Image: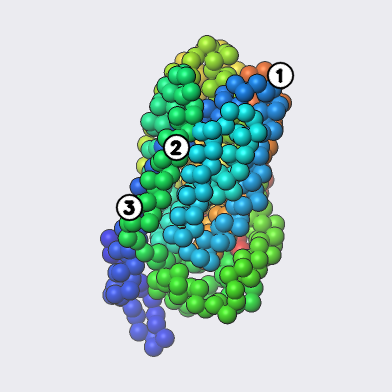
Amino acid sequence: MALGVRGRGASGQDLTSETPVTATASSSAVSSRRFLLWLYLDLFGVSMTVPLLNLHVRSLGVSPVVAGIVGSSYGILQLFSSTFVGCWSDVVGRRCSLLVCILLSALGYLLLGMSTNVFLFTLARVPVGVFKHTLSISRALLSDLVTEKERPLVLGQFNTASGVGFILGPVIGGYLTELDGGFYVTAFMCCSVFLLNAGLVWLLPWRETSLNIPDSGWSLDQKHATVTIKSESTLQGAATTPEARRSGRNLRPPWVEVMSTLKDMKNLIFSALWDVFLVRLLMGVAVMLYYSNFVLALEERFGVRPKTTGYLISYTSALGTLAGFAVGPILRLYKHNSHMVLLHSSALTCLLLLLYSTTNSMAMVVLSSTLLSFSTTIGRTCITDLQLSVGGAQASGTVIGVGQSVTAVGRILAPLLSGLAQEISPCGPPSLGAALALVAILIMTLYRPPFSGDGSERLKRE
């Protein structure tokens, strides 16, 4: 794929041919995106263990409320580490940060394989909660590699690649958990997959090259982070490497850069992105509540064994993978209006959560799970694209890191709310999720952004 840059240079002459640096960057972008497909092997290991965590901690003899408190520890750690890791990846580079996060996450799953009591289980969640940010770093890398117009399609393919790991993982995890000591075997297998991915990051050749043309967003200069608007006469099509981006601010230590970025995050969150992040939080908690007791609820409501539930999770994951290919056509149908796609997908999610929580038929559970796999995949892609459109891509790692922090707040709230709701009924968590999704729909309806896929007009109004 060749990418050319058209524009007007300093001499006033049109640039109509492909420049060598752009051709090199395009080749690097394609090879890096192919490399990322291998990286998501870790989700195969994660999908074997995560659906079984609530079942395992309950088997240790704790109540639903205590299980929710223990589960929220992961979200608390993610909350305080997501933005920091995102800033850190902007400063030190994606490859180094990926390698460190993968290795320390492997340590966490190794400890999980030895968690024979609640204390060890909670301890094992610490390194995973702090360093399991491979997805957010990879999203930041993808946003570095593609132009803004390509970004929704590439993020959809990204979600498709990440969903592949969830096809086989739940089946294997559900089968192993019915064996004696099966959960511990599953955790050790997850650790092995993370070590394999660390080897791939270390051995495979790849380059970090930015092809993004930042129409708007905030750029980190030598003094402070600012929100900038690109003038129409400015040409910003040249590819830049992370080393080149960092050379302009090498007079300041990396930790000063990180702290400076964190200091200016408050203005970004509470001005241009507050409603986007609030919708992300509400919809994230809604979906987490649905999955929080999925295995337990099907066993209590319909007598379905974990192995059979694993097949259902794998089925919906496969459909979610296919839904990633539909993101491009759907956005073209909506004329690249990510906000409207997000609004409609959230409305569908709300209705499906309500259907799942009220039905007495297993067939309706399968139907709702089938459609949820599509609506949540499309919604996840659109909310990430809105973040980058409004917040800008020049500090994509930081913007996505803040988004992950918002999701981490959801990971704190969801287990607590799920534990309380399960005390009332197995249908409590998804019913509460439907209510939160309705609130998100109302917010999107009341605070409709004055743009359609382009964040520059919104920033001009702020």
Relative image position of residue 120 (x, y in whole percent): 61, 34
**Tag 1 or tag 3, which sits nearer the N-term?**
3
- Residue behind mark 2: 190
Relative image position of residue 43 (x, y in whole percent): 44, 40
- Whole-angstrom CA distance, mark 3 to mark 2, is 22 Å
Relative image position of residue 366 (x, y in whole percent): 46, 20
Residue toward you, 90 or 235: 90
Around disc 2, counting alpha carbons within 10 Å, would you say few (fewer than 14), some (14 to 19), or many (20 or more)? many
Q: Residue at x 36, y 64 (%)?
A: 207
Relative image position of residue 186 (x, y in whole percent): 45, 30
Mark 2 residue element: helix
- Whole-angstrom CA distance, mark 2 to mark 1, is 34 Å
- Residue behind mark 1: 424
Residue toward you, 157 or 256: 256
Mark 1 residue element: helix
Around disc 3, counting alpha carbons within 10 Å, would you say few (fewer than 14), some (14 to 19), or many (20 or more)? few
Q: Which mark is residue 191?
A: none
**Tag 2 or tag 3, which sits nearer the N-term?**
3
Q: Residue at x 55, y 54 (%)?
A: 400
Q: Mark 2 is on which residue type?
A: Cys
Residues marked 2 and 1 touching at CB (< 8 Å): no
Q: Which mark is residue 34?
A: 3
In the image, is 437 to the left or to the right of 162? right
Work out whether residue 349 can be spotted.
no
Figure colour scheme: rainbow
Q: Mark 3 is on which residue type?
A: Arg
In the image, is 365 to the left or to the right of 204? right
Camera-side mark, 3 or 2: 2
Instruction: Locate the C terminus by quadrant.
Output: bottom right
Mark 3 residue element: helix
